Amino acid sequence: MLSATLFTLAVLAVGAESSELSLTLMPDAVNTLNARCLDGTPGGYYWRPASNPNDATKFLLVLNGGGWCYSAEDCVSRSHTDLGSSKGWKQTISDDGITNSDPNFNPTFSTWSVAYLYYCDGASYGGNLSQPLDVNGTQLHFRGFAILNAFIQHLQQHRSLNSATHVVLSGHSAGGLGTYMHTDHVRSLLPANVIYGAVPDAGFFLDTPNVHGQYYYTDRIETIANISQVVSDKDCMAAYPTDTWRCMMAEFVFPHITSSLHVIQSSYDAWQLSNVLQLDCVPSQKNCSSTDIEAFQGFHATMLLHLNRSGVLDRPGLAMWSDACVAHSQAYYGHYFNNTRWMVPSGRGLTLVDSIDTWYNSLAAGTLNSTAVKRIDTCEWPCNDGCHTY
């Protein structure tokens, strides 16, 4: 599949030296908030404190990705993996991209405190079923929203988040969708005067048919949203009282978000090409038919259309990075995040790290409405010379 090929190629790239984040589980929140992974184990996050005392009140909060489960039976299977249970989580994880601790590689966030919430509810941190669901004797707990709240509460009680002056929420893939869904909610839990923004990465999954004309992905998201009684942006939920599943799709949530955003979204999203469009070929390997290529290029046009229709392209003060590259989760892999070959527009000297840093500096200075920049490849693949061979 296309996405698997992309990630195989990705390991060949060289990133900056990494450091580790350490696991913190939240067992007390099982009792106080019923905050549990699918299998009932406690949620948790990985932590690295600020390395510069001057940045002790600055926090990067990350929502991990990892897809979804799409039926009760599928969620049972997921509950036996690290995406549904904390039983097997490692004690440490390595950083990369926006969490990298090298200031030469990651100038803005390298010295901040980083709290990386791990994903185990299968519903983009939105599961809110009050009682466990019995599936042939297996108890499933859809409590992702409680885990998100426990995360913020634990950081306030134990990591001084209640004294934060600067907070950026980010997430990639399913966590990128979670960032859209929960950005304003997280903001509501923070100090009133905090400088706050969000960086959703590869979370704009499209409500669009696959190559066979079927709304395959949309139907599956509707199913898991209904099973888990998903919670999302409150204004979106109010706008779709009988179709709340729509608020588990970024294009329906986005018009209701009031927080400042830096959106990252490839118009040839690698995961979506394989799993939403269900295109089973790789253009760079020249194994696609003319019909496949038409669908491939059509997805780029559809992505830009949906971004425009939802208001992303027109909103003042919103920054954006949308490359015509086959890529996914670009802020979390060094070969995307800070790579002088990987630019929008191609060859213009503007890398993803430059784009995010420019957005953040404007946000911190209070000048975002007049300076926010949207960097968008409107041309078709392989127009971006730095990335088209990936």
Image (cartoon, grey):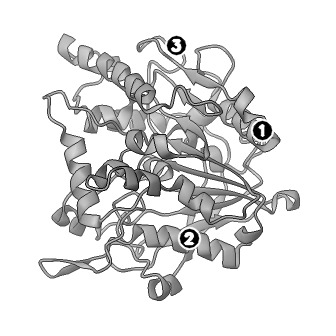
- In front: label 1 or label 3: 1
Residue type, label 3: Asp
Residue at the spot 47% in from the left edge and 11% down from the top edge: 383
- Name, please, the residue furthest toward the right: 54
Q: Position of residue 3 (x, y in %)?
A: 34, 36
Depth check: 304 or 11 in front? 304
The quarter of the picture where residue 278 lies is top left
Q: Identify the residue position indicated by label 1 in the image.
A: 361
Q: CA distance from mark 1 to mark 3?
A: 28 Å
Q: Secondary structure at mark 1?
A: helix
- For residue 151, the mark is 2
Local SS, label 3: loop
Which amino acid, by three-letter code, is at mark 2?
A: Phe
Compared with 343, 58 (above or below) is: below
Q: Say which amino acid is labelled 1.
A: Asn
Distance from the alpha carbon under mark 2 to that under mark 1: 26 Å
SS at mark 2 in the image: helix
Relative to 39, is 214 on the left or the right?
left
Q: Earlier in the sequence, mark 3 or mark 2?
A: 2
**Where does the image place residue 214, in percent across and percent down from the top left?**
14, 34
**Left or right: 93, with 254 as reference point:** right
* Residue ID at (61%, 34%): 318
**Badge 2, how many Cα within 10 Å: few under 14, some, many 20+?**
many
